[in-house]
Amino acid sequence: MAATTPAGTPTGSPAGSPAGLKARTADASAHARRRRMWGTVAFHGSAGLISLLWLVPIAVVLVTATRSFDDIAAHGLGSMPHSFTLGGFRQAWTDGGQQQALINSLVVTIPTVLLSLLLASMAAFALSRYDVPLRRALLLLMLSGNLLPPQILLIPVSKLSEKLGIYDSLYALIGVQIGFGVGFYVFVLHGFMRAIPPEIQQAAVIDGAGPWQIYTRIILPLARPALAALTALSFTWIFNDLLWAITVLRTGSKMPITASLLGLQGQYVSQWNVIAAGSVIAAAPTVIVFLRFQRHFVAGLNLGAVK
């Protein structure tokens, strides 16, 4: 049996011989496999650590929501639970006003999402499928409102809502959310609709379809992944908004659920189980919407990446 070198090349075999080349190829392949293995281990390890850092606060909130106030007061907020109760949810729902606040949030969010996407899809259809003068200028103008820091617009928006007579009403909050959201939605939908082949629209025109039929029967179905993604995003943004709610609303009974969480914290003593339960209630609708639109949401992101 021929002796081999530490590198695995048989002694006496020329470096350029078939045996030497085969040995070097095997070494390179083994080295590449080891690198891939360690790369995979490092990736999964870092991903697991990041996931753990993300899941720990959620687990703490869920556990705190099911503990009693006496348990937290006696053992501390960071201790292991010594009780299990759903009383915190009942207190947040009834005594904390979460029930009315959730209704207010849904009354604001659902119409705002529907109206915003309707207006944005119409504007994006016109700008992407027809030769509109100053199209790029209009897109930049619509998007410019989202580039401004909202803090510098708080006083103007508050004064304008007072002048219009809608201050301290849900109509003011709906109007603000639509006004500051439509521009971004138009910008996103314009990119999707512009990528649709023009031959489809030309064939529909030959068949006698008008602009409204092209919009409703062709463009909207093809843009459904983008609309679903924007539905999930806009619902989350609007439902979780706090800044505009405390800007145009004053009455506590009209506040959305994000603002009502502020009322759950006491001035001297805070019932952390009630606050945690209220946070879970406030997060539940957005989680449900995301799970409902998850498939379309991912499809919309992938479609945007391909295009």
Image (cartoon, rainbow, N blue to C red):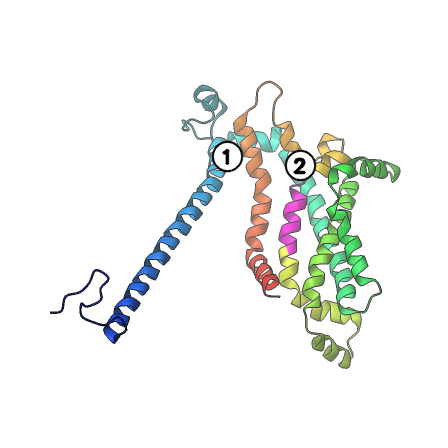
Residue furthest top in the image: 268
Label 2, on which residue? 101
Characterize the magenta stretch by its predominant secondary structure.
helix
Q: Which mark is residue 45?
A: none
Q: CA distance from mark 1 to mark 2?
A: 20 Å
The x and y percentages for residue 180 are: 75, 47
- In the rendered view, does 10 fall on the left or right side of 177? left
**Res 288 seen here:** yes
The x and y percentages for residue 249 are: 76, 34
- Label 2: element kind: helix
- In the rendered view, does 129 fall on the left or right side of 20? right
Specify the quadrant of the image occupied by residue 270: top right
The x and y percentages for residue 19 are: 23, 73
The magenta segment is: 230-242
Q: Which callout, 1 or 2, points to the residue nearer the camera? A: 1
Q: Is residue 250 magenta?
A: no
Q: Amino acid at mark 2?
A: Ala
Label 1, on which residue? 61
Q: Quadrant of the N terminus?
A: bottom left
For marks 1 and 2, the one nearer the N-term is: 1
Q: Give the residue at x 50% y 24%.
A: 69
Residue furthest bottom in the image: 206
Q: Give the residue at x 83% y 38%.
A: 156
Seen from the viewer's position, the closer of residues 159 and 168 is 159
Q: Amino acid at mark 1?
A: Val
Specify the quadrant of the image occupied by residue 202: bottom right
Q: Residues within 10 Å of mark 1 (few under 14, many from 20)?
A: some
The x and y percentages for residue 107 are: 71, 44
Seen from the viewer's position, the closer of residues 32 and 41 is 32
- Label 1: element kind: helix
**Res 97 seen here:** no
Residue furthest left in the image: 1
